[in-house]
Amino acid sequence: MAGLLFSLPLGALSNRMGRKNAMLTGMGLDIFMRVLQILVHSPELLIIVSFLEGIGYTLLIVSQAPFLMAASDEKNRSLLFSLNFGLLTISSAIGALFAGQLPALIGDRLNIPAESSTAIGAVLLISLFLGTFSLWPIFRIDEKEIHDTETRSQKSNILATLKKSLVWKIFLPNLLLGFGAAILIPYMNVYFTEKFLISAGSLGLLFSIAALLTGIGSVAGPLIAQKMGSKIKAVVLTQGTSLGFLAILGFTPVNWVAEVAYLVRGTLMNMASPLYMAFSMEVSDPADLGAVSSMLNISWMVGWAIGPVISGVVQQNYGFTPLFIATLVLYTLSTGLVWVFFHDSEKRVLIPSSDCV
């Protein structure tokens, strides 16, 4: 709710503060409120603290893409956006691996049950302590070197920005994509368990490999964009190709085929996301970057706010087949709209031949 309600105002605030200060403020507020989430015991206070944490996290998120835009040029922008996406996925997977083992270790040391709130709270505090180190490299950034101070002179008018058709063209494909993902992708563990009776250990290995391939794909995506001379062509190619593997995943009766399709689909689809984000920043006016980043955030969050409710009802009554069909349709519409809206938009934004690793 905090993200949905405050994305646009926080995008404007990010413009006014500058990306560095906005990210430091957002990350600092996010970490501090997460610490309070662990320490408070009142349900009412927990709700308030969680809402404030959502505001801090949203300020961080809506500032990231405009910051990466300011900190990069046409030669390295695709790679920077893709590495930001891929490294986050890989580090999250590694963190999850350690987090699964730490409660037992802490429980043994403190002679308390591993599933106790004390042991789990200690793991969370350790993760937040590690997270504070993210503040240091951001703090060391010189805004003058990346020309980020220019954004403060740009007066941001949210209403004027929302009247621009380009903003809604950027918004709509991402909205369809987010909704299609929300009704299906979070439930892949349930799907594999119910249909193929895969063990929890095998699922963990599958998802770890998927995270690794996503990281590798984050480097391959910019190479494809450079080879094709267009981010949009690369988005349509990788996202469109992934649809075939999504269909195989949903309808094959063979376990290993479904697993391979899952890995390939995820790798291809996740190649497209950072490229689309980079393109969205490139074609937007500097004064609109905060609002456009906010709209992209909102487009994704709307689907994830509504989708799980619909998905739960469908799974309970009809199984996964309608969800696969719906996601295929939504992904196809999203990919088609990206092509219709933007296939000729990069004629004036050429990607130099040096845009590679």
Image (cartoon, rainbow, N blue to C red):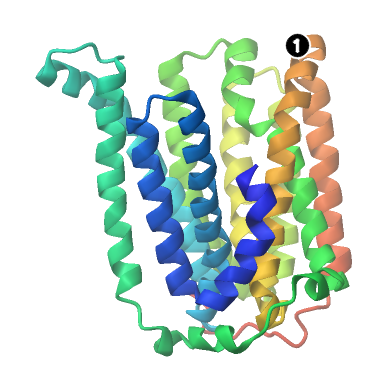
Kind of residue at disc 1 = Gln
Query: Please, is residue 72 above or below residue 310 in the view?
Result: below
Compare residues 42 and 196 and report the one nearer the observer.
42
Q: Secondary structure at mark 1?
A: helix
Work out whether residue 257 can be spotted. Answer: no
Report which quarter residue 161 is drawn in. Answer: bottom right
Residue at x 83% of width, y 33% of height: 326
Quadrant occupied by the N terminus: top right
- The residue to which callout 1 is attached is 316
Measured as percent of width and height from the top left, residue 203 is found at 48, 23
Query: Please, is residue 187 above or below residue 349 in the view?
Result: above
Query: Please, is residue 144 above or below residue 188 in the view?
Result: below
Report which quarter residue 8 is drawn in. Answer: bottom right
Query: Please, is residue 194 above or below residue 21 in the view?
Result: above
Residue at x 69% of width, y 68% of height: 291
Measured as percent of width and height from the top left, residue 250 is found at 73, 26
